[in-house]
Image (cartoon, helix red, strand yellow):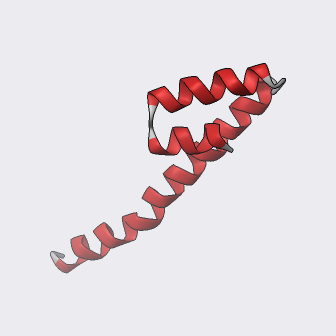
Amino acid sequence: MAIAVAHVTQCPYCIRAHTKQAMRKGVTKEEIMEAIWVASEMRAGAAYAHATIAMDEMEKFG
């Protein structure tokens, strides 16, 4: 969870610290990548969802 949040907030120090800690606790590389992919999709999803605001404004200009 912390790895995903660190990627969404884009904090390189948090990413390093949480990744190291996860590896020490036995989290697999695959599990870490899954957390990163979920974070990426959530972040991209927000941009996609908010794109309708820009599209609405563009429509006003024809």
Q: Quadrant of the C terminus?
A: bottom left
Closer to the camera in the image, 16 or 40? 16
Residue 11 location, quadrant: top left
Specify whether 26 is left or right of 40.
Answer: right
Residue 47 point in image, percent of width and height: 43, 57
Residue 44 point in image, percent of width and height: 50, 50
Specify whether 19 is left or right of 48.
Answer: right
Closer to the camera in the image, 17 or 12? 17
Q: Residue at x 53, y 38 (%)?
A: 7
Q: Residue at x 38, y 70 (%)?
A: 52
Q: Residue furthest right?
A: 26
Specify whether 11 is left or right of 2.
Answer: left
Q: Residue at x 59, y 48 (%)?
A: 41
Q: Residue at x 64, y 41 (%)?
A: 2
Specify whether 9 is left or right of 60.
Answer: right
Residue 45 point in image, percent of width and height: 53, 57
From this view, report whether residue 23 is shown above or below residue 18: above
Q: Residue furthest left?
A: 61
Residue 29 point in image, percent of width and height: 76, 22
